[in-house]
Amino acid sequence: MTAVFVLLILARRTFCRRTHSRCKPSGIRSAARWRQTGPGATACPASLEQLASRLALHEDRFVVACDDEGSGRAARLLWTLHVLGHRNCSVLDGGMTAWKGEGRRLTCESAARTGKSVQLGSLDQGPIATREFILSHLENERVALLDVRTPEEYAGTKRLSARGGHIPGAVNLNWLETIDHDNHMRLKPKGVLARMLTERGIRPAQEVITYCQTHHRSAHAWMMLKFLGYHSVRGYPGSWSEWGNDPDTPVELDTQKKP
């Protein structure tokens, strides 16, 4: 039977309600360890291999990732696992918000782990969109760009990089709109999500590239599209932290019409 390994990626340390003492839930890891020092960039293969070994990330191990902030960090881990070629993984919908909201059992004990060495093969480039890939497909109607930042970031009125705006041709869907805040931060129903995408011209037959500022929010969008059955989906790890700081990349500042 496939082992289940729950990995918690929390925005902050968790407190045990009974003792009010700091505790580390089972298998907790900082999301930053799955990224390189540059904003959003994927960690180098050597760092990923070291971390995979610490987690005993073998083929027979099923990873369930969760966090406490709407599954953005957990989704980034899921995307990274796909890059590593590890498909035995999923995200706990709603994460710790849903788990605790439904009164499920919690523990402050750390699970025993065996850090067996893991040798990674070549990384799977399928889930990755690079700046060069996007530049070469800007005029391709079969490729769609989904910007999941806020409308202000998309329009360029809120700037988090040297330049504001968005990648030419990208449509905007704020990732927070896809989360059901009245249902413990779970994804909204499939029909609602599919309609949001259709209204913005995103079709399942297209290859969809998601991006935000550092591929945190857009990893969530990547996960959502996979959940909806989109077969060809890429995430742009550099996202706007790379694109918006490159003086040679094209930028649009106009806002899209609301569907």
Image (cartoon, rainbow, N blue to C red):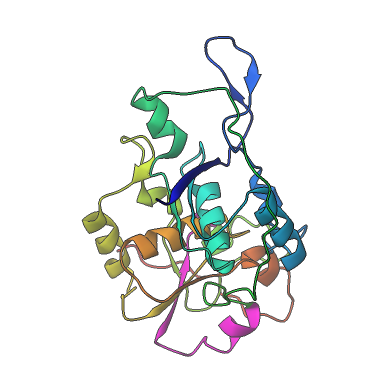
Query: Was residue 142 drawn as part of the magenta stretch in this picture?
Result: yes
Q: Is residue 140 left or right of residue 108?
A: left
The one nearer the camera, 234 or 157, is 234
Whether residue 212 is visible: no
Question: At which x and y percent is residue 220?
Answer: 47, 55
> Up-down: is 136 above or below 152?
below
> Up-down: is 181 above or below 189?
above
Q: Residue at x 52, y 63 (%)?
A: 86
Residue extending farthest top: 19
Question: At which x and y percent is residue 207?
Answer: 42, 79
Question: At which x and y percent is residue 55?
Answer: 63, 48
Whether residue 178 is visible: yes
Question: At which x and y percent is residue 172?
Answer: 44, 64
> Up-down: is 235 above or below 153?
below
The one nearer the camera, 135 or 18, is 18
Q: Residue at x 55, y 48 (%)?
A: 73
Q: Is residue 193 left or right of residue 50?
A: left
Residue extending farthest left: 191
The one nearer the camera, 74 or 256, is 74
Location of residue 114 by image quarter:
top right
Location of residue 198 by image quarter:
bottom left
Q: Residue at x 62, y 77 (%)?
A: 130
Location of residue 13 by image quarter:
top right
Mark count: 0
> Can you say which quadrant of the picture contains the C terminus?
bottom left
Q: Is residue 110 left or right of residue 82?
A: right
Query: Was residue 144 drawn as part of the magenta stretch in this picture?
Result: yes
Q: Which residues are magenta?
A: 131-152
